[in-house]
Image: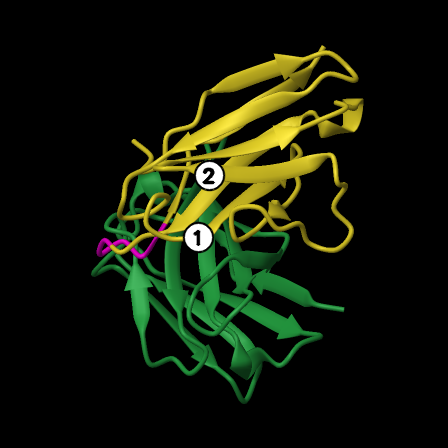
Amino acid sequence: QVQLVESGGGVVQPGGSLRLSCAASGFTFSSYGMHWVRQAPGKGLEWVAFIRYDGSNKYYADSVKGRFTISRDNSKNTLYLQMNSLRAEDTAVYYCAKDAQYSGSYLDYWGQGTLVTVSS
Amino acid sequence: QSALTQPASVSGSPGQSITISCTGTSSDVGGYNYVSWYQQHPGKAPKLMIYDVSKRPSGVSNRFSGSKSGNTASLTISGLQAEDEADYYCSSYTSSSTFWVFGGGTKLTVL
């Protein structure tokens, strides 16, 4: 069965950096696009970033463009989100999600999320 | 402000039907059939309920259905049950630079 397990969340000061990981299993990771989606406390879902199956194309929400970088290691079945210049408004639960196709269609499986808190 | 507009809340009694709307533009909802809907219970990860506007994943009750007209997509839940009480989000591919968008979410209360 498909499993997505996020890790790397924690408390970081404003301006700091954090790298999230998402370990995937139960499917051919290298064949599917992957997303990061976040949810601030008490708020709705916000799409963050997408990477194609082979890493050839990456897309970002305007709110994180230039600060966050999505990447993947298909040999390790792992998705990453490098977050730099963190702000208080980046505080959220971050979910990784599998896309049903290689290029972006819908998010068919989600991890349980990892909490990132940006605070001094 | 979310790119897709949903009502903040809807409610219904057990056994009734409700519909949640999701309004976008011709760059997202109206231009593509990549509209999907997600259910989220408190403290849980979202769950896919509808994809490609009106298709149901295996295991999702046929009480859930989706449709689209112009720039507005809709999720209908018939025969409301207590366990349907949750937040619901629509989502779509967008041809804008953003690539993907969610609606602001709708809280469904089963009275």
Q: Is residue B95 above or below residue B38?
A: below
Indicate the position of residue B10 as horizontal and vertical percent values.
56, 17
Taking the spot 33% from the left edge, 39% from the top edge, the residue there is A89
Q: Are labels 2 and 1 on one chain?
A: yes
In terms of depth relative to the viewer, which is nearer, A15 or B34? B34
Type of the residue with mark 2: Lys
Indicate the position of residue B53 as horizontal and vertical percent values.
52, 47
Q: CA distance from mark 2 to mark 1?
A: 9 Å
Residue marked by disc 1: B33
Residue marked by disc 2: B68
Indicate the position of residue B30 as horizontal and vertical percent values.
34, 44
Q: Is residue B11 above or below residue A36?
A: above
Q: Chain of mark 1?
A: B
Write down the region rendered in magenta: B96-100
* Quadrant of res B111: top right
* Quadrant of res B57: bottom right
Taking the spot 56% from the left edge, 84% from the top edge, the residue there is A76
A55 on left or right of A28 = left
In terms of depth relative to the viewer, which is nearer, B13 or A83? B13
**The colour assigned to chain A within the rendered structure:** green
Q: Which chain is yellow?
A: B
Type of the residue with mark 1: Asn
Taking the spot 22% from the left edge, 56% from the top edge, the residue there is B97
In terms of depth relative to the viewer, which is nearer, A113 or B88? B88
Q: Residues within 10 Å of mark 2 (few under 14, many from 20)?
A: some
Indicate the position of residue A77 as horizontal and vertical percent values.
57, 80
Q: Quarter of the image containing the N terminus of chain A?
A: bottom right
Is residue B98 covered in magenta? yes
B101 on left or right of B53 = left
